[in-house]
Every structure is written in C-alpha cells, then in structure tokens.
Image (cartoon, rainbow, N blue to C red):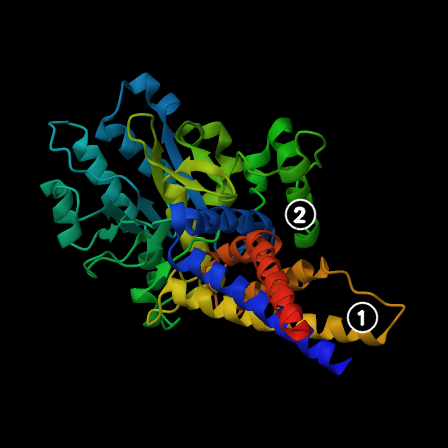
Amino acid sequence: MLGTMRKSHKWNLLQVFILCVISIFAIWADPLGYSDATSKVSRDFFYKVISVNYPHNEKDPVTTIILDDEDIEPYGTWPVSYGLHAGVLNAINSFRPKAVFIDIAFIDNRVDPSIKNFLHALNSLHRSGTKIYLATTHRLPKIRDDIRELVDKEILKLVSIDVNVSKSDYIVYPLVDDKQELPSAALAIFEDFRPNEGFDKIKSGKMDVFWAAPPHSFNCRSPEQKEECQAYSENILLRFLRLTANGILGNIFSFNEIDQFSVPYIPQISASDLLDGAKRELLAPHLSEAYVLYGVNFVLTHDQVHNPVYGNLPGVHLHAMALDNLIAYGDDYILDDPLKDFSNEFHQIIIVILSGIVLFLWRVLSSLVNTHCGIIKIPAVLDVVILFLFLVFVAYVQFEYGRFSPTNWVGIFSVFLIGQAGVATYLSNFIVSRFSQSFVKNKRE
C-alpha cells in the first residue's frame, strides 16, 4: 500500500507540475492575447462585485457639475461663450464650496467680450475663499494669456488631466503627470485640504480607481432610476453568486441584480439645474462646503471615461472618483503597479507556483483520506474548489492589505482554473497513463 501511495504522489506531482508549466506559459508568452483579455474581464467582474463594499464618504462631499448638449442648445454649439461658463461659476460660488476644479482646457484665443465676465467669476470665487483648479496637459497648447495671469497671481492652480491606458485597455490615474511637474486634480485638491496626511509616497504612484456603488440617492430621484439603484445586493457573496449565475444562465433565467448602473456614485448636477434658482434647496447639501468638479459631456468632445461599474460616464467623474478614493483611503489607495522592482508577470508566476504547492498538498491529503477511510471518498472535482478558495484568499489579502490592483493577480483565476479543468488535466492524465503503461510493461519484462 505504501508503494502505491508513493506512485500516486509522484503522478500528482507530475500533474501539478504540468499544470503550472502551462499556466506560466499562458501568462508569460500570452498567446493570442489570452492573458491580457482574461485579466481585463476578470478585473472588471471583480470591481462589479466589490464595488458595494466601498467605504462611503459622508463628511467631505464630492459633486460634479455637467454641461451637456441640452444645456448649451439655447446658446449655440461648442465652444460656448465664456459668459455661460461665468454663469455656471457664479452659481457655484453662491453655495460657497471648498474647491472648484474646472475640467476644461481654455486654449481658445478667440475674441469673446464675455471673457471679462469669466475672469471676474474666477476672481469672485477666489475672494470667497474657494480654491480653484484648472485642467491642463503637456499635450495641449498653452492656455490663454489672460487666464495665465491668474495662475501667476496664484488665483488658480493648474493641474494635470493626463491619464494612462494599460496594455489591457483600462485607464490608470497617475497622481502626477509624466514629467513629474504637475499634480493631478485629485491629488492637488487632497493635498491642499489634507496637508498633514504625509503623502511623500503617493506622488510617484499610479492609481487604479475604485469605482464605488451604488449610485448616490441624489442621482436616483426618478421612479425608473430609484428601481435600478435598488436592484443590487449589499452582500458581496450574494452579489458574486447572482452576477455569476446571470452571466451563465442569463438567456434562460436571471436574478434581479444590476450588472452596470446607468447613473453614477458621485452626485451629478446638470448645468441647467444649477442655473435654475427654484432648485437651490435641492442642490445646497451637495454644493455647500463641497469639492465641486465642473466638466462637459458633448458628443463632439468625446470626453468620456469607461469603467466596469457604470459603463461610460463624463470624463470629470474619473477625477471625482479618484479624489473620493484619496478621501476614503489616503495613501492606502489601490496601486496599479505595487511591485515596482518586479514585473506583473513575475508576480503572477509566484502565485501560480504557490497555487501548485497548495493543489499538490491537497491531493496528498485527499489521497490519504481515500486510502484510509473506506466510507469517505473525496471527489476529484474538489481540486477546482480548493484552487478557487485559495486564490480568493490570495486576492482578498492582496487587495485588502497590500492594496494591489486586481489587474496584478485576478487574471490568474481564469488562466489557472481553466488550465486545471481543461488542457492541463487532459495532458497530464495522458502522460501519466503512458508512464503507467510503460512502468507496468517494464515490470513484467
């Protein structure tokens, strides 16, 4: 019996070795872009599930103001007059916010008499004690000279709106621009209002923005929106099971579990509502003493950001959500590249090797149970369950304590589990059977 168990352990070790080799090849060589694709899909699914566990920020409200096609229809087409922007800023100023970020790059030197009104609105905000931040990037021409004068006088501060796109096609939010000169909008606001947080570490980091759910109640005022905003599970496990079931059985049967919300987590106020004096009481809780981010959402500007929880949103929501992440987590935000000295692939390979060791030890244990306990038989399908539970544990520890972006590890779920259930198992069983036949044949001879 002892000899049989040793042979069984050898075969198990060989199977696990082959599985690890195939998984490492899939990660390192990435044939047909399989590893990148699974990383993106797995990351998106992870954030859809975990989004309901976001630590909601109640003390420091973050609000967006959106100027869209409907708002500018009475005023013509884009670019609109500076007078309209002045009207928006004056309306914001009446609520006395802490800070205003203007997510519009004013590089147009066109002649517009209402530019005086716009400059006056900026000066009025400054005199009211509101800090003002203006979007810019090294890829754009320089801003207008008359606005540059306000920068030189420290009436407003220039901030970077640069973002990076990974090879897996998801957006990374750098906290400083590529030239390490300008802070991002989120970091600039956070550092000005949280000066004692100690953020030396944060300045070189790139954030994987954690998109929170559910949408803010302000954005769920209509009956249709209210119904959608309530169609989710607060329990992460239940949400995971329902989304998984909907993904597999969606054409046959589906649970009442929203996959992507159509309205955002951050309160979103239209410019028309802001300029409507009758709605002042409704808007006041979201603008008074708030961080207000003003942006546009026009068909012509294509200024939208894609995310797994809400699909496409106006681009200013990326800065708003990044700021909310800093308020919620401080320098414990989610790092896109937590292991600067190691490649992402090397990190994933380490997890594969650890998973292989766990799988081998489990097979040894199950073999002992099956051999010595005649009544109890552990089915082979539990291999996948054990692997899955181990990877969930690794995922939880890395995300919750290491603040690793799921992009650094979540793709291993699909790579390793598919390998275990499919090709690797088939090949390993094939090789094992051939070795067994050869071994028996040599023994007889």
Q: Residue at x 52, y 70 (%)?
A: 401
User: What percent of the width, then of the height, locates residue 142?
Assistant: 12, 44
Q: Is residue 167 left or right of residue 118?
A: right
Q: Is residue 259 left or right of residue 78?
A: right
| Front label number (2 vs 1) | 1
Q: Which residue is mark 1?
A: 370
**Type of amino acid under label 1:** Asn
Please, what secondary structure does the residue beneath circle 1 have? helix
User: What percent of the width, then of the height, locates residue 376?
Assistant: 86, 67
Q: Nearer the viewer, residue 289 or 377?
A: 377
Image quadrant holding the C terminus, namely bottom right
Please, what secondary structure does the residue beneath circle 2 have? helix
Badge 2: few (under 14), some or many (20 or more) residues near its Cα, within 10 Å?
A: many
Image quadrant holding the N terminus, namely bottom right
User: What percent of the width, then of the height, locates residue 156?
Assistant: 23, 51
Q: Which residue is mark 2?
A: 239
**Type of amino acid under label 2:** Arg
Q: Is residue 352 left or right of residue 130?
A: right
